[in-house]
Every structure is written in structure tokens, then in C-alpha cells.
Amino acid sequence: MKPVYKTKDGRVAIYRQDAVAFLRGLSSASVDVIVTDPAYSGMNQRLKLGSGKIIGRYKEAGQNGAKWFEEFHDTEENYRAFLEECYRVLRPDRHIYLMFDSYSLLTLAPIVRDVFDVKNILCWDKANIGLGHYFRRRHEFIVFASKGKRALNCKSIPDVWKIRRILKAGYPTQKPTEVFELMLRGSADAGSVVCDPFMGSGSAAIAALRWGCKFAGCDISPRAMEYSRKRIEGWLKGKGDIFQPASQVSDDESITQLLAAKPRSRT
């Protein structure tokens, strides 16, 4: 398995591949923490709510020029195969963070309990109201689970994270880096290997670099590869986060203090 982009020091490697195939190419027990936001199909394919300003017309999915990106078809079989590969590549006594919208949480979260030990469900409060046909959406969920036993690095992290959504971005569904940084604040050490099988805009990669970690990421989209490569190179050249120049933390001083902490040495 050859990366599309790899830094000279080997600290970051990104791959263009199907998420499950990517995970199957990784060695067993080679990853310290998994943080990811799969492109779930359920909300769009089952509800079919028309067109959205980010993803474009549903009927144009996959066509050249459409804004739509390839979705992960969240059948029970597919999702279980994905989770089982996540379990295999994760080192013993380590953590996984899986992002969910409200619809996929109902259909898929129970499967996570068959593979991992689910510890909590976290809520990302986006501060700004979003789209929605039946109540406007302002949040997403994060299932926090473990392989074996491992305490959090910090006991003062709340289960609701008030971090503003990215309103204007060059990539669909770009997540704030601070969401991933809080995951790493809880579960990563300096030098840990962070993995994101649905890398998208590369926010998790920037969070890993900020936290002094290594990063292995994957996405099936060529656009994601180019966007993430530019973003990572910009960071490594000292230009900061070129696609999220400002912090998205809202009016929560405790979150700001948590993100200001230094990563602990790897154990």
C-alpha cells in the first residue's frame, strides 16, 4: 500500500483508498487512537431530503463536477467490517472516537457495542444553527469507546463541546480541528499514531500535528487528497492552518484551557 503523500520524516502519510481496504493494509495493533467522521449514507439515501447547499443535488451523486463525495454505505455488514478492522489495527488498551449524525446514531451505534466497549456518547454543540426539515440541527454525536482498559489523560473534559461549525470552507463538511484536538487531549500522547480512515478535509491530521502525534489517513476522494496535502504542507512550512486560520472554540473557557495544555510523553 503506497501513500499518495508522505512527509520526509514519515510523520504523516495519507492514502487514497476505500476505508476498509486501507485498514486491511495496516498492521495489527499499529495505531494508538482512531478519530473519524464517516460519510454516512443513511440520512441522505433513506430520507432523501432534496438538495443541500454543501452536497449538491442528491441525483448527481458521483457525477463529474458534482459537489457530492462518495458515501460510506452504512449497511450493517459494511459497518461491522469497518469496525472489526478498526479493532484489529488498534493497539490493546486504546480508544476510538466515531462521529455520528442523529440518524446514523440510531441505526449504527448499537453495532459499535458488539465490537468495542462503549464508554460514553459525547455531543458536539456547533453553536450556530444548521439545516433541518424537522427541527434545525445544531449538534452531532461522538461515540467514545475502547479496546481494553485505558483511562483518559484528563478527568476534566466535559461531554458537551461547544465549538462553532465551519461556515465557509473549501471542502464539504469540514470539521473544526478543535473537535479532533479534544479527542487527542483525552486519549493521545506525544508520538502516538493517530488514524482517520475517512480523512476528508484533513482536520484530524492538523490536530495530530498540533498534538505532536504521527498521522495515517485515508479518503477515497481525489479532492480530499489534494486539499489535505496542501493543508498539511502549509502547516509544516510554518504557515499555520491555511484552511482554518482562526479558532472555532465558542464561549467556553474550560475548552480553551483544555486545548492549551501540552501533550504528555508517550507511555
Image: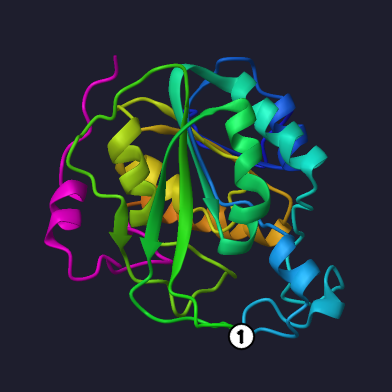
Residue identified by numbered label 1? 133
Q: Residue at x 56, y 61 (%)?
A: 101
Which residue is at the front of the view, 81 or 190?
81
Would residue 266 be counted in the magenta stretch?
Answer: yes
Q: Does residue 212 appear in the picture of this structure?
A: no
| Left or right: 44 as drawn, with respect to 118 | right
Q: Residues within 10 Å of mark 1 (few under 14, many from 20)?
A: few
Q: Position of residue 15 (x, y in %)?
A: 67, 40
Which residue is at the front of the view, 242 or 123?
123
Q: Which residues are magenta?
A: 239-267
Which quadrant of the view contains residue 84?
top right
Q: Position of residue 174 (x, y in %)?
A: 51, 65
What type of secondary structure mainly makes up the magenta span?
loop
Q: Does residue 56 appear in the picture of this structure?
A: yes
Which quadrant of the view contains residue 186?
top left
Q: Position of residue 76 (x, y in %)?
A: 78, 42
Q: Quadrant of the N terminus?
A: top right
